[in-house]
Image (spheres, rainbow, N blue to C red):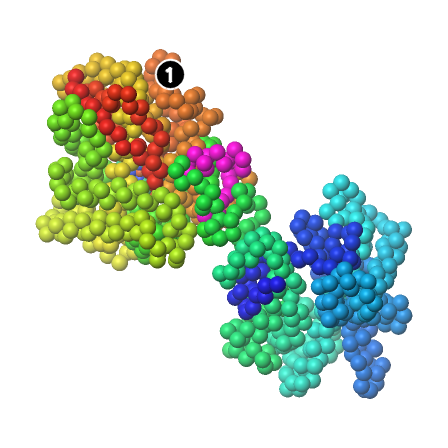
Amino acid sequence: MVVASGCKMVKEAIVTQAENFVDRPHSAIADRFYLGSTGGLFTSSGETWKKQRRFAMSTLRNFGLGKSITEQSICEEIRYLQEEIENDKGEPFNPAGLFNNSVSNIICKLVMGKRFDYSDHNFQMMLKYLSEGISLEGSVWGNLYESFPSVMKHLPGPHNRMFSNYETILDFIGQEVQRHKQDMDPNNPRDYIDSFLIEMENHKESDLGFNETNLAMCSLDLFLAGTETTSTTLQWALIYLIKNPDIQEKVQAEIDSVIGQIRQPTMADRPNLPYTDAVIHEIQRMGNIVPLNGLRMAAKDTTLGGYFIPKGTSLMPMLTSVLFDKTAWETPDTFNPGHFLNADGKFVKREAFLPFSAAYFLNKKDPPNFPPGPPTLPLLGNVFSIDPKQPHIYLTKLADVYGNVFCMRLGRDKTVFVTGWKMVKEAIVTQADNFVDRPYIPMVTRIYSGNSAGLFFSNGKVWRRQRRFAMATLRTFGLAKSSIEQSICEESRHLQEVMEKERGEPFDPVPLLNNAVANIICLIVFGRRFDYSDHNFQSMLKNLTEMAYLEGSIWALLYNAFPALMKHLPGPHNDIFSNSKSLEASIRSEIERHKLDLDPSNPRDYIDTFLIEEKRNRNSELGFDERNLVLCCLDLFLAGSETTSKTLQWGLIYLIKNPHIQDKVLAEIDSVIGQTRQPTMADKPNLPYTDAVIHEIQRMGNIVPLNGLRMAARDTTLGGYFIPKGTSVMTNLTSVLFDKDEWETPDTFNPGHFLDAEGKFVRRDAFLPFSAGKRACLGEGLARTELFLFLVSLLQKFCFSTLDGVELSTEGIIGATRTPHPFKIYAKAH
Ligand code: HEM
């Protein structure tokens, strides 16, 4: 048996991990006793327990608290009790029997619809059996029976009385059930037994514990659990009040001034009796009625306090250790109503006040109706079930099993995966505001921090302001002036030149494409381009590529799942941090260079514009500070160069693998633009086939296969499932770009996807390489311009092929982006 001790650990077990420790362990006593039933309320588990608990709670409400009938019957019962005590005429007496009697009558009212007179002999016997049964269960005899049931079964001893006692009570309840059946009105249930009998009719098929044997068991449990506990608390109350006469007097004075002597109390008086309320709480704390709590059992493999607890282990969440926890109470061992009072004498709740233990419904981890998912390993969750080589394919296939909205646990937290065009659109377009945020990611928090979260990982007003600022600046220095078209064409000429230098020999196009694309972002952010032979620039690009790969790789997944552990382990994940450090240093020196000759009335690029805005927005908390400038630049490079360069790389691969398509594109370019002038964006409407091919390259290229991670900004529902605020949400773009319901030939490179019968270009809804909604790619316009101009000007000049007999692979390497395996090409000038 595992014992959990102290407020923190007990709460961890029964609240935070409620679901893991919700079951009761096997008990030999219960086994013999509940034989053939479904375990009543106390020892049942699973669906039957859930259903029976809910039923009992709502019935108690109906016949008790809800209608305030219980208040009246308690007050009535108190009058009987007062009479009995008065009968003793000042002589000493034992209050235990009286308390048992009156408390039990309240349960009788709820369960059987009637009370019993204190002189009723049968009822007195029942109460005696009940209290004897309970004390035997907890005695050494009960423990012996639990440990050696097969021996003890055959031995004489008081433990046998335990069973005969309970059986007598069950008979007594059984007679009540029969009595109820005779005059029950199904439209007008009088009590728990009536309601249960009616419910039995509705559950003929499913059962779920709605049978007569279990009715007797549940009633017995209500008696067992509801009589002794309450009555014993009242007995302790008398003891503590007698031992502390000053406190007793203070309570009496408060009651006197608030209620007086004439009328009976009601629950509405409680808020006006803070001292009395505090005393009652302190009685419950010190009374410590259920010192060891009900035993629980691990319903699945789990960990607690760092230890592994296998499924089926018994757990004792010790309530004594909570109610007397030295770190939770000021004077744990002294009767002190002050524990529940503030400086003004007002009543205050205390977190470690758990005399009733803590309930299942407090569980925050898996709310009802949470999306389903594959079973998880206790510590690691599902991290290792994901295929690290092709996670996007594995995750897409998983939807065939669990549906379009399912969940997996990666480390501590659950991530919800959204699959297919319809559901992804529902999340990021229809419910744009609900899924607009990015989640907390440990790896990112180590790089980005505080208000400075760059563009990609920031949220709220900082993100909105910075996103708007970046988009406006991209327009100013890029698209709007159409200067960027010129710069891209100029960059294309540099690119063509270096390719020509290869003189028909096979070469690796990747560094050249990286160079060319990064130069466009450099122009916008730094105001200048770098030569392909610039050593610093080359090492910057290398850092960028590595970072983009590592951020999405299995190492990042591991780091994010177990940051505290991974921080101390060697491995490639550490490179992310060293890479980002050296990139940050390069950006910082560019910023310093800008400051030297900044002209506030004539900004040259993003950095200039940001520095000017920083002066204007000082202390505005909108992210206009230098640390954030560095991170925003980093994001523009990370998001803006790798993605576009890789799309161009996939473009070459698909064109080389489909020479007839390459020929058709060449022919279209030839007839519309010719060989002499450079392309412009104005040519695009006249090149529908080329446009369709570029779109199909982006679809099949599937550059950001799992999209940027999102987070539910508030509680919401998706696909009928409840998604609580703060849940990480992955909207799987692979499942959209290859959605069988949206594409005619999802797995084949087919420009026809974007062409109508007359060869005109047509848009497709499920074309989402840039994602969609408010958080979609902010560089889409720039990226599309680059893709069109780079590809058209390259094809205008060259015909591409690869080494004879080599089949280029279309299976990518998956990081945050999908990268082609290294490949070599020939570029033959026309
Ligand atoms: C073919 C090229 C590109 C592709 C396929 C692409 C794709 C994406 C995707 C899928 C996202 C995540 C969106 C989401 O979470 O819903 C994204 C975000 C982003 N992209 Fe792009 N992108 C490309 C080019 C660019 C370029 C050229 C830039 C920069 C100028 C850029 C800057 C960004 C930024 C800053 C974000 C974060 C937006 C935010 O969180 O508000 N991207 N991109």
Please tell me which residue is depicted at 45% across the width and 46% down the height of the picture: 383
Looking at the rendered structure, the kind of residue marked 1 is Asp
Q: Say left or right for 571 vs 309.
A: left
Q: Tell me which secondary structure the magenta stretch mostly adopts.
A: helix
Please tell me which residue is depicted at 13% across the width and 24% down the height of the picture: 503
Residue 506 percent location from the top left of the image: 19, 26
Residue 779 or 432: which is nearer the viewer? 779
Residue 762 percent location from the top left of the image: 36, 21
Name of the residue lying farthest toward the left: 597
Residue 691 percent location from the top left of the image: 29, 22
Quadrant of the frame with the C terminus: top left
Residue at mark 1: C-beta within 8 A of ligand 1:
no
Instruction: Give the vertical position of 710 relative to 87 (above or below).
Output: above
Answer yes or no: is residue 81 visible: yes
Start-end of magenta stretch? 391-410
Residue 25 percent location from the top left of the image: 66, 58
Residue 266 or 669: which is nearer the viewer? 669
Answer yes or no: is residue 117 visible: no
Q: Say left or right for 87 vs 818.
A: right
The image quadrant where one finds ligand 1 is: top left
Instruction: Give the vertical position of 483 relative to 693 (above or below).
Output: below
Which residue is disc 1 drawn over? 756
Residue 749 magenta: no
- At label 1, counting other C-alpha atoms closer than 10 Å, the crowd grade (few under 14, some 14-19, many 20 or more) is few
Numbered circles on residues, count = 1
Instruction: Give the vertical position of 534 relative to 5 (above or below).
Output: above
Quadrant of the frame with the N terminus: bottom right
